[in-house]
Amino acid sequence: MAEKVPTVIVNQEDYKEIILKLNEIEEKIEFTNSEIHQRYGKKLGRDIGILYGICTALMVVVVYLLLMLSPLVSVIQKTLSMLIFGK
């Protein structure tokens, strides 16, 4: 059974006004949505920056400790070998 699609006759001026209002509403929604996504992106970028900073600082500390303690490693090794093996 085929049903007929209802048809409505609307004044052209009213139709244009409604379309303009809908376009304005759509622009406001898009703007708000983009602002929300931009704030989320800023938060995510800040968090990633903090992680990169922590990783870089840890690498600098490890390299610094390795360079500063490298002369002591041979002294500690000699001392331990003397204590253990008596040489």
Image: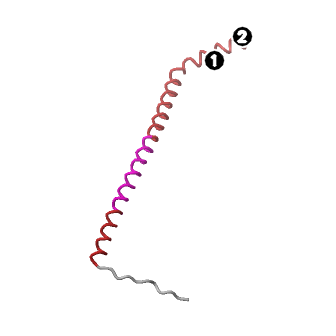
**Residue drawn at (72%, 13%) of the image:** 84
Q: What element carries label 2?
A: loop
- Where does the image place residue 44, in percent across and percent down from the top left? 45, 45
Answer whether residue 45 is magenta in the image: yes
- Where does the image place residue 46, in percent across and percent down from the top left? 42, 41
- Crowdedness of circle 1 by 10 Å Cα count: few (<14), some, many (20+)? few
Which residue has dot 2 on it? 86
Nearer-N-terminus badge (1/2): 1
Q: In the rendering, which numbered label is found on residue 45?
A: none
Which residue has dot 1 on it? 77
Is 56 placed left or right of 85 in the picture? left
Q: Which image quadrant: the N terminus? A: bottom right
* Label 1–label 2 contact, CB within 8 A: no
**Residue sitting nearer the eye, 23 or 74:** 23
**Residue sitting nearer the eye, 77 or 59:** 59
In the image as oriented, which residue stretches furthest toward the right? 85
- Is 21 located above or below residue 13 in the figure? above
**Residue drawn at (59%, 18%) of the image:** 74
**Residue drawn at (27%, 76%) of the image:** 13
Q: What element carries label 1?
A: helix
Q: Which image quadrant: the C terminus? A: top right
- Where does the image place residue 37, in percent across and percent down from the top left? 41, 52
In this rendering, the count of numbered labels is 2
Question: Is most of the magenta stretch helix, strand or loop?
Answer: helix
Q: Mark 2: which amino acid?
A: Gly
**Residue drawn at (40%, 47%) of the image:** 39
Answer whether residue 80 is magenta in the image: no
Q: How is the image coloured?
A: secondary structure
Q: Mark 1: which amino acid?
A: Gln
Q: Magenta segment range?
A: 26-46
**Residue sitting nearer the eye, 78 or 5:** 5
